[in-house]
Amino acid sequence: MLLSMQKVKEIYSISRRTLINWEKEGLITPVRTPKGRRRYKKEDIEKLLGMIEEKPKPTVVLYARVSTKKQEEYLKNQIRRLEEYANSQGWQYETIFEIASGINENRRGLLKLLNKIKRGEVEKVVVEYPDRLARFGFEYLKFFMESFGVELVVLNGRENEEEINRELAEDLIAIVTSFAARIYGQRGAKEHGNSSSQANF
């Protein structure tokens, strides 16, 4: 959209002198009409005023995860291997890593990654193994990413069997512990309610 000097002044309160000075400094280039009058692109004016935020270019995100703090060394090695691969491809990248169960759908790192994808800030996601991204529901996450035009790169098809079994055991323990806490919490609340009722008689 092209604006005259008068329109620029009305909309943005920018004087004719300011426009001429911007032109002299090479900050803005007007379009000339057949009669030689200046017209200014609306987007150029707004960019100068900082009204348009330039979207960051889509980037590559490396995602690494382990289930417990005991696996911190494995996490470091996982990150190192991902970064070595990204560097070999000449990619600019960001690394997101976390210590969280693969069955936890509310992981901070995962949610951060998904929000970046929704904002159009991600071109590729790279993981070492499918279950680093999710223990269950990997295909759904892959479909979600692809629906936003994001390529999911998996470096290795299957993880070490011993490592898988160890993490699965820890994840199952976490599920049982959480489930038991809920049951006992509900039971405790119910018993407390009953004792309060009896005290009132």
Image (tube, grey):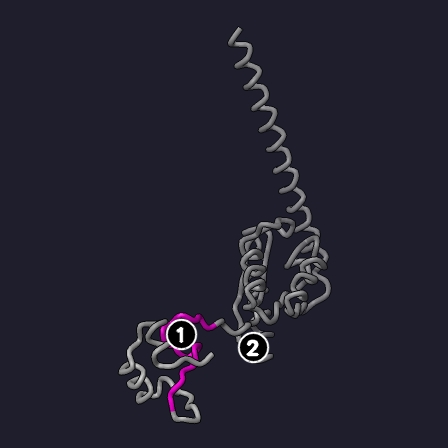
- Element carrying mark 1: helix
Name which residue type carries label 1. Glu
Q: Residue at x 55, y 54 (%)?
A: 99
Tell me the CA gap for discs 2 and 1: 32 Å
In which quadrant of the rendered view does residue 132 lie? bottom right
Mark 2 touching mark 1, by CB under 8 A? Answer: no
Which stretch is magenta?
37-54
Q: Residue at x 65, y 46 (%)?
A: 171
- Element carrying mark 2: loop
In the rendered image, the vertical position of residue 78 relative to residue 135, given as above or below:
below
Q: Is residue 100 left or right of residue 47?
A: right
For the residue carrying disc 1, how many other residues have a C-alpha within 10 Å: few (<14), some (14-19), or many (20+)? few
Between 26 and 37, the residue placed more toward the observer is 37
In the rendered image, the vertical position of residue 108 relative to residue 34, given as above or below:
above
- Identify the residue under disc 1: 46
Between 109 and 73, the residue placed more toward the observer is 109
In which quadrant of the rendered view does residue 19 lie? bottom left
